[in-house]
Amino acid sequence: MLSLLISVAGGAPEPDTFLASKTVHVDGLGSFYPGWAFRAHSAGGLGYPPIPLDGYPTYSMQRSTAAYFLGNDTGLNSAAEYAAEAKFGIVGIGWQIGMRSLGWQHLEAAEVETARALKALNPETKVLVSRNTEVATVVWDAVRPLLVPPGPSQHPEMWVHGKPGGGGCAVGAVCNSTWDCPNCGKPPKPSAVPFGKLYFNWTSSLLVDWWLGTHIGAAIAEEAVDGVYFDCSCGPPAGINRDGQAAFMAASQAAFDRHLPLLASKKKMTIAWNGERISQGRCAQDMTRLLSVYANATNETFQLIYDNNPANLLPTLAAFLLIRGPHGLFQYTVIGPYECASAPCGRPDSPASGFGPYHWSPLLELDYGTPVRPAVQGRDGVWRRQWTKADVSLNCSEWVGRVELHN
């Protein structure tokens, strides 16, 4: 049974984490969830590995852009959507791709078809698929057999069961929750799939082997898939009491870390859709912190989030160019569940319910060359950095960024 289980592909991300950066504080371990950040203590950054793909590291601005959870939820992408997505250097396919037409299943096939179509348009675009570090649901064909009757009773040790003092599920019951996406149609009726999403038991070797061999391993075996980006519920471990949380989280971190050498050996990329931020109200503090962490980093990918507000494009772009090293991604923020790059997506009967589009800018297609030296802060408080083809500056007090190309 186990060998058959691990031989097929599967996984599932979590649709409700777009609202904010969610972490859980566990005494002795700090605030994190494996996959949202890649290590428990984030003082040294989020811990995202260097990008091992062909053409990376790169200072090409266009190839240094990223967007996640992209895709049409009413069916596979239109020609306009494919063209818009293919502009990005890194495209994360959303779990919602085609959900209305596919009936919340067959996602593996939709991912591969989408990845191949994007690469046919732009062979330089790298395509990632979403996988989860905390829960599973039925959108992946490999997960569905674990949830439909007889469901988790087939492998009860894979799932968290409620402990006395634990929240989120009854004592002794499998920790089950809902998986909702207003834009993606209704999930299967509870009578057909009574388990919306089940929580991984990271203390189970069966679960860990399945997660590595199926949830992750089968995805990266696809030639058109360049890697994985991670998601989680990112809350306190369901069903685990306070006294047991530290050990449970340590087990989840240890299991999660096992995917790093696996993907490295296949030269596949791994990252999450979380990133660093710089804001107008905390610009000076953010710049100081991020430069201290990433300015000399050659073994970590710096991912800076742009909020898709054109008014903030130049300050955020300037900050990115001031801070970034050889491994850097300018990430468009995740807007909601989930977005299109070409037009709003969502319920066709209510376009206002959709999310997107991303506001692409020609500034992301320009050649700024390579950095000449690290950023410095002048006596006027303005941060500056010279590139071979541009001069970059950020005035935090006025929230003004400048990227001036050399003549």
Image (spheres, helix red, strand yellow):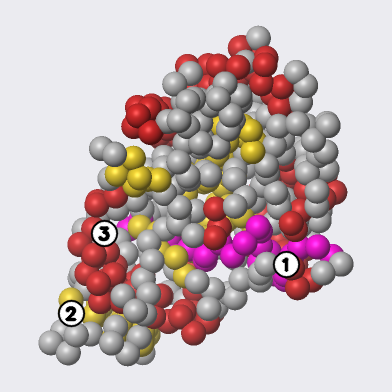
* Residue linked to disc 2: 377
Above or below, 111 against 155 in this view is below
Give the numbered dot on residue 294.
3
**Mark sitting earlier along the chain (2/1):** 1
Coordinates of residue 109 in the picture (x, y in percent): 74, 38
In space, the residues marked 2 and 1 are separated at their CA atoms by 42 Å
Give the numbered dot on residue 251.
none
Q: Residue at x 30, y 61 (%)?
A: 325
**Mark sitting earlier along the chain (1/3):** 3
Coordinates of residue 58 in the picture (x, y in percent): 39, 59
Q: Residue at x 37, y 75 (%)?
A: 279
Left or right: 389 in relation to 265: left
Q: Quadrant of residue 381?
A: bottom left
Q: Amino acid at mark 1?
A: Gly
* SS type, badge 2: strand
**Mark sitting earlier along the chain (3/2):** 3
